[in-house]
Image (tube, rainbow, N blue to C red):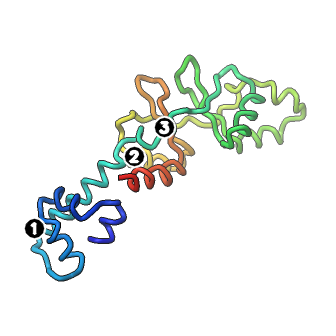
Amino acid sequence: IRKERKRRGLTQSFLARKAKVSQALIARIEKQQVDPRLSTLKKIVDALVEEEQQKVSRAIDIAIRDVIIVNHDDTIEKAVKLMRKYGISQLPVLRNGTPIGAVEELELLKAFSLEKDIKKFYQKKVIDAISSVYPMIEPDASVADAIDYLLKGHNAVLVTKNGHLEGIITKIDVLMKSKHIIASV
């Protein structure tokens, strides 16, 4: 219990209030001075689980809100420059504010290697280079939903509301932001 409480950044007092037990009991359990009843242990575990779910439960809480995007009629050159400037490997493609796909550096590199006229390659429109369509979830969707999509091989998940982009979640966002949210409690 001590390990899980500390991992979540909770005090004994806070956990005790959530579990509706005394702080002294939490302390004695953690020092292994007492074996709690099963019903008491269940209250404590339920409080720990509930607290974790509340900390990182919504997709929008870990999404990057200032999403770097390209419009469907922008050039590949613009997309490549944005990727380089911001150190990112993919960009959502929007048409009239609505996501329609994404361009990714690996697919751009493949197309680049096959192109004989490099100048022509960079002047092509982004819409001709769309290589992926990222799954879209609502802001209040669970982080677990985003993780499921990422584990299925998608490079990103878009957080959208009424069809408009609100944020983007990548694998590193899940790993870093989830930790930050839990630790900041």
Q: CA distance from mark 2 to mark 3?
A: 13 Å
Seen from the viewer's position, the closer of residues 39 and 34 is: 34
Depicted 129 relative to depicted 185: above or below: above
- Examine the rendering and report whether any part of residue 151 can be seen: no
* Residue 6 % position (x, y): 34, 66
Which residue is depicted at the point 19% across and 76% down? Answer: 29
Query: How packed is label 1: few (under 14 Cα within 10 Å), some, or many (20 or more)?
Result: few
Q: CA distance from mark 2 to mark 1?
A: 30 Å
Q: Which residue is mark 2?
A: 143
Earlier along the polypeptide chain: callout 2 or callout 1?
A: 1
| Quadrant position of the N terminus in the picture | bottom left
Seen from the viewer's position, the closer of residues 150 and 33 is: 33
* Left or right for 147, reference 129: left
Q: Which residue is mark 1?
A: 39
Earlier along the polypeptide chain: callout 1 or callout 3?
A: 1
> In terms of secondary structure, where does tag 2 sit?
helix
Q: Tell which tag, 2 or 1, sits nearer the viewer.
A: 1
Q: Which residue is mark 3?
A: 135
Say what amino acid the circle numbered 3 marks.
Pro
* Residue 67 % position (x, y): 56, 33
Q: Which mark is residue 96?
A: none
Say what amino acid the circle numbered 2 marks.
Val
Seen from the viewer's position, the closer of residues 45 and 164 is: 45
> In terms of secondary structure, where does tag 3 sit?
loop
Earlier along the polypeptide chain: callout 2 or callout 3?
A: 3
Which residue is depicted at the point 36% across and 64% down? Answer: 7
Instruction: Specify the farthest residue to the bottom.
Output: 33
